[in-house]
Image: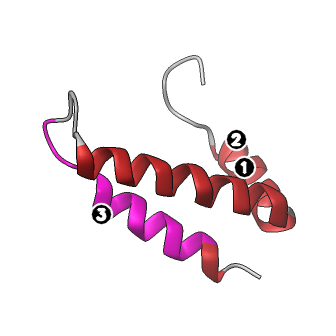
Amino acid sequence: MSNGMASARDVETARKAIMGNPELRADLIGKARSTMADMNDHNWGNSINRAPEMNFLIKALGKIK
């Protein structure tokens, strides 16, 4: 991501890792929950509270089997 944007290949690599690794998904869910709680409690430095997006991510990751 030298230009700040993920390439299609980078996205596919991440997608495969997330889809194929339940431990990674569980770790991401835990980190997203922690981030969401912090955003709701403090919202430091954010012009917009992104907690609803974290909630969407948590739900989407939880649906993957």
| Mark 1 vs 3: CB contact within 8 A | no
- Which residue is more in the foreground, 33 or 49? 33
Q: CA distance from mark 2 to mark 3?
A: 25 Å
Asked if residue 11 is among those painted magenta in the image, a careful observer would answer no
Q: Amino acid at mark 3?
A: Pro
Region rendered in magenta: 47-61
x and y percent of residue 57 in the render?
Answer: 49, 64
**How far across and how far down the image is residue 8, in percent?**
64, 46
- Callout 2 amino acid: Asp
Mark 3: which secondary structure?
A: helix
Q: Which residue is mark 3?
A: 52
Write down the residue under mark 1.
14
Mark 2 or mark 3, which has the lower sequence index? Answer: 2
Q: Position of residue 29 (x, y in %)?
A: 60, 60
Furthest toward the front, the residue is 41
**How crowded is the residue under tag 1: few (<14 C-alpha within 10 Å), some, or many (20+)?**
few
**Image: 11 above or below 23:** above
Q: CA distance from mark 1 to mark 2?
A: 6 Å
- Mark 1 vs mark 3: which is more N-terminal? 1
Residue labelled with disc 2: 10
| Mark 1 secondary-structure assignment | helix
Q: Are marks 1 and 2 in contact (CB under 8 Å)?
A: yes
**Is residue 57 highlighted in magenta?**
yes
Q: Nearer the viewer, mark 1 or mark 2?
A: 1
The residue positioned 51% from the left and 19% from the top of the image is: 3
Q: Residue at x 31, y 56 (%)?
A: 51
Is residue 28 in sight in this rendering?
A: yes
Residue positioned most to the top: 2
Q: Nearer the viewer, mark 1 or mark 3?
A: 3
